[in-house]
Amino acid sequence: MLQNMNSHQKEVDTLRYLHPQWAYYYGESVRSFRSQKNVYKSSIEHIDFDCPSVLAPDQPKRFVLGGFHPYNGTPEDFKRFCCELHLNPKDMHIYLDMNRLPLESIERRFGEYRIQALIESLPFNDSSVDFLFLDFTVDYMNDEQLKRLSQCSSVSLSPNGLMFITKTWPPDIKELQRKHPQLTLHPWYVGELIAMMPNLKLVGFSCGYDSSLITMARKDSPFKNYTLSPSDLREEYPWPK
């Protein structure tokens, strides 16, 4: 599953002593993975209708959560969601974060796969990840990080692998930035985000009241390309925000 970790050890050793600003964030109340689970489920089921092997019950799947808050219920919500979606005893639920605190929290509560790494430097073998969830993670990622994520995820995702990116509605980023002044947030409209990720193709999009879900896959995947409408590009919800 993992690449030779020697190449990542120096990076991981450095990460252990950086990013103290996240300590403040972990003390804040932020939305849980639970708030988006129905949107994730709907998107996966829609794609599975066209490509049933996505959720083939006899095929073990690897689910990865990239970046997470340890105390808002997200770790438990993620595992529960994955088990409801696909229950195979050989499934793997993998928690990845650049900070050590969330991973240590998981270790104390329940045994799961835990990896400390940067999301834009996914340390997985080629074609080994079936589902990669970035639950509002890209709100904290800049241009270069997204470009690196595009490259490494296009290699790490399996042929039928899917990456789900949930992000905050861009105008709301200003308020979020006010709540978390110690962190740098980035407002991304869907067209801008896709432009930063040229190694992947868009296969799904859903716009909610204050967030959007972008589904991406490898360019050689069997999934149909999703074409954004003008209202998609503006991220307009059916009623005024």
Image (cartoon, grey):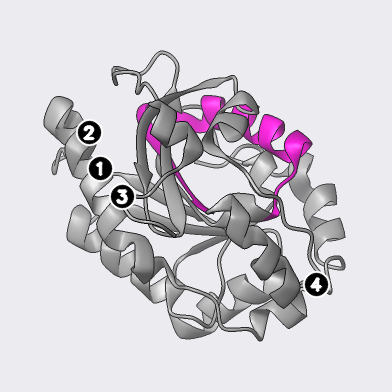
Residue bounds of the magenta highlight: 140-168
Q: Pick whichever, 13 or 98, lies toward us.
A: 98
Amino acid on which disc 4 is placed: Pro
Residue at disc 2, secondary structure: helix
Residue at 44% across, 72% down: 32
Tell me the quarter of the picture where residue 142 sits: top right
Tell me the quarter of the picture where residue 103 sits: bottom right
Q: Residue 181 shows which numbered tag?
A: 4
What residue would you read off at disc 3?
Answer: 238
Q: CA distance from mark 1 to mark 4?
A: 35 Å
Q: Pick whichever, 50 or 9, lies toward us.
A: 50
| Closer to the eye: label 3 or 2 | 3
Amino acid on which disc 1 is placed: Ile
Tell me the quarter of the picture where residue 99 sits: bottom right
**Up-down relation of residue 238 to residue 108 (above or below):** above
Amino acid on which disc 2 is placed: Ile
What residue would you read off at disc 2?
Answer: 47
Q: Measured from the top left, where is residue 199 in percent x and y?
A: 57, 20
Q: CA distance from mark 3 to mark 4?
A: 31 Å
Earlier-in-chain disc, 3 versus 4: 4
Q: Residue 236 shows which numbered tag?
A: none
Earlier-in-chain disc, 2 versus 4: 2
Q: CA distance from mark 3 to mark 1?
A: 22 Å
Q: Is residue 132 visible?
A: no
In the drawing, does residue 193 fall left or right of residue 112? right
